[in-house]
Image (spheres, rainbow, N blue to C red):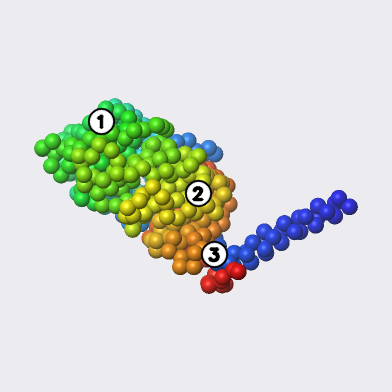
Amino acid sequence: MLRYLKTLRFICFFCFSYVGMPLFHYAFGIESYQPVATLLNNDSNKLEYFGDIVLLSDERVALFYGKRIKVLNPSGPDGKPYMITLGQGVQEKPIQEKPILSLAPLTGQRLASGLSDGTVKVWDLSTPHKEQCIATLKAHDELVVAVMQLHDGRLLSASADGIIKVWDLSRPDHQQCVATLEHEACIAAVRQLPDDRLVSLSTDGVLKVWNVNDLDEQPCLATLTDNIEDKLRSYLVSPTHGRVVTCFSKRAANVWDLNKLDQETPVATLIVSADESLETLIGLDDGRLVSCAGDGIKVWNLHKPDLTQYETLLDEQTGRVESVVQLSDGRLASCSIHGVIKLWDLNNPYGERWVGTMEHNCDTGGSLLALPNNRLVFFSYDGVVVVWDLKKPVYQKLFDRCILF
């Protein structure tokens, strides 16, 4: 009897998983997507120094972990994505002597990487069969926590030694460093605003605003102090013109108005989570802010006079959300620690914000990257890279205007 009950339970579970759930999604407006490509990492069984993914100028994707950089082409010669290891055709050993900690795309199919030994390497991806490392900058005394390209094409590197350096790669060797900007503590994050000003945040809560277009004069325009509580993780987001948001992995984020450089306190404080630490923070194209914690995804409208209340709560995702990105059509994609990826439409006129689910074989968290033309890349902690085309759901909505009474 027990054996028949177990068989019946298996049949019920199978019917629900493969028939019931798809019909539920089909009926109530939740689209499902299957990957167009799943690429496995064969370099090692365990990833150390898990990195992030960045979009290159030619719409290829660069990702890094440990001592390696891989380049993903979402549209190969046969229309299928493929991935190569940078420098693999030149030498078999790892192309970096030290672990990579930061990565940034440059113009002209170039890439910059910051290493744990304080050096910055510049790569030319247009020469696949030649030596791709075209420059090695002895930049800092400690690990390079961030690299980025400024609006005028110059390269910036920031380090745990509290130093920010600006590089002009068109100059001869040993003359490429054109500016040195100093903090008193480890640099946590840097951002460049649309008006070209540079904002940097250090782990002691000091926020500095720089004029990088006139380095002959005093480049530091203002110094602001954030009352920090936690130094484990730092965030610096610029969702609107003249405003930045800082957060130190705590339950509150501060909003600063950089049009008022004489301010001593933030213009608002957002309670991003009631009882959980912040996991990620991004700015949307329309100036809104998205915060993710264990109690859900919150959307903040920084244009409203009262910034202490969020306007939208997305709490249908099980597990802590670790990554969220905005797609080219304005929708959001989020990934939980369990590897569940969901699609959200903040402008859905019928109230349902959860509109899609990504199906894949990964059960770990990771990083998301939005590609042009509504494509999405997921880089998991176990080294699996998954690509989706969000224009092609497995099953479409059946009741676009279904109203439940």
Question: Identity of the amino acid at label 3?
Answer: Glu
Marks 2 and 3, how far apart at CA: 21 Å
Q: Secondary structure at mark 3?
A: strand
331, 363: nearer the viewer: 331
306, 224: nearer the viewer: 306
Q: Secondary structure at mark 2?
A: strand
Callout 1: few (<14), some (14-19), or many (20+) C-alpha neighbours within 10 Å? many
Question: Identity of the amino acid at label 2?
Answer: Gly
Q: Is 6 on the left-hand or right-hand side of 145?
A: right
Q: Nearer the viewer, mark 2 or mark 1?
A: 2
* Residue occupying image coordinates x 49% and y 58%: 343
* Residue occupying image coordinates x 30% and y 41%: 266
The residue indicated by pointer 2 is 296
Q: Secondary structure at mark 1?
A: loop
The residue indicated by pointer 3 is 31
Furthest-right residue in this view? 1
**Which of the labelled discs sits on residue 183, or is there none?**
1
237, 212: nearer the viewer: 237
**Residue 14, picture quadrant:** bottom right
Question: Identity of the amino acid at label 1?
Answer: His
Percent x, y for residue 355? 51, 62
Please report contact status of discs 2 and 1: CB closer than 8 Å, yes or no.
no
* Residue 324 seen in this snapshot: no
Callout 2: few (<14), some (14-19), or many (20+) C-alpha neighbours within 10 Å? some
Q: Nearer the viewer, mark 2 or mark 3?
A: 2
Percent x, y for residue 101? 38, 37
